[in-house]
Amino acid sequence: MLKAILFDMDGVLFDSMPNHSYAWSHAMTDFGLKMEPEEVYMNEGRTGKGTINILSNRYWGRDATDEEVERIYEAKSALFNTLPEAQPMPGAMELLNKVRARGLMRVIVTGSATHALLDRVNAAYPDIFSKELMVTAFDVKHGKPNPEPYLMGLKKAGISADEAIVVENAPLGVQAAHAAGIFTIAVNTGPLKDEVLKEAGADLVLPSMQYLADHLEEIVIG
Ligand code: MG
């Protein structure tokens, strides 16, 4: 019996990936590391250091030093902060209202380490989420694609994997949810091919959050 839906945040609840993509690819280029926007989407969910080391190994043949990681990550963050704030994902509010009306728990499972995350979430989605049912980078040792964040989400909700559904947009997030044994819906809100999300382990790939909102009953009831 379904008791909860676990939501990723970037690219699911907020249309924030275009900003991340722009900031990463431009910051990397300034350091001589060419990162195509699509590669940012492929690596969504990885730590900053992990992402930087993929590029530094390709172009420099070695891991970046801690100082290089810090400088590149600061450049990315500075650029990101100049961009207009990401908007709620179209269809998400409608979906969340339906989920609440069905009496299902709403859990956020994000790799983000943003302080005041709950304030931002509550401003966009009033009366939907609570601090107790939120997993952020501060709660876990291992980020996605490790299953730990989603296992932590189940634990906080007090439920088992077969009582939940995950909504994800990123290949590494789908891998994490699949590895946690949870039925995983991928919403393809970015430029990647559906096959990439299927190969990561998605049980279902949908074109948008609006589509999921429109078809929630048939998908959940089956
Ligand atoms: Mg995401």
Image (cartoon, rainbow, N blue to C red):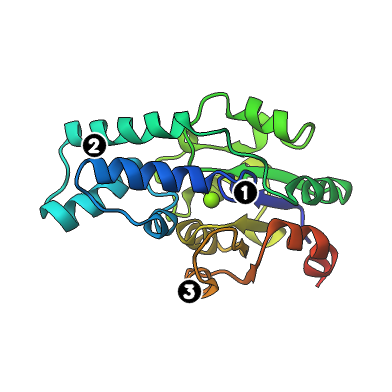
Mark 1 secondary-structure assignment = helix
Q: Is mark 1 within 8 Å of ligand 1?
A: no
Q: Position of residue 139 (x, y in %)?
A: 49, 35
The three-letter amino acid code for the residue at tag 2 is Val
x and y, in percent, of residue 92 in the image: 73, 48
Task: Return the x and y of residue 53 as percentages of the image width and height.
Answer: 23, 49
Foreground disc of the pair 2, 3: 2
Q: Give the label, 2 or 1, closer to the camera.
A: 2
Please tell me which residue lies in front, 69 or 90. 90
Three-letter code for the amino acid on which mark 1 is drawn: Leu
| Residue 86, quarter of picture | top right
2 and 1 marks in contact (CB < 8 Å): no
Whichever of labels 2 and 1 marks the residue nearer the N terminus, that label is 2
Q: Which residue is mark 3?
A: 199
Q: Is mark 3 within 8 Å of ligand 1?
A: no
Quadrant of the drawing holding the C terminus: bottom right
Q: Of residues 149 and 59, which is closer to you in this image? A: 59
Q: Quick one: label 1, few (<14), some, or many (20+) residues within 10 Å? A: many
State how far apart marks 2 and 3 are (Cα). 30 Å
Residue 123 makes an appearance in the image: yes
Report the residue at 51% width, 48% height from top. Answer: 17
Q: Which mark is residue 154?
A: 1
Residue pictured at 63% horizontal, 57% vertical: 166
Residue at 57%, 24% (x, y): give it: 116
Determine whether, in the image, residue 26 is placed left or right of residue 2: left
Residue 195 in picture, x, y percent from top left: 51, 75
In this view, which residue lies farthest toward the right?
101
Label whose residue precedes the other's in the sequence (3 or 1): 1
Q: Residue at x 47, y 49 (%)?
A: 148
Q: Nearer the viewer, residue 88 or 109?
A: 88
Instruction: Please say if 138 is above or below 215.
Output: above
Amino acid marked by disc 3: Glu
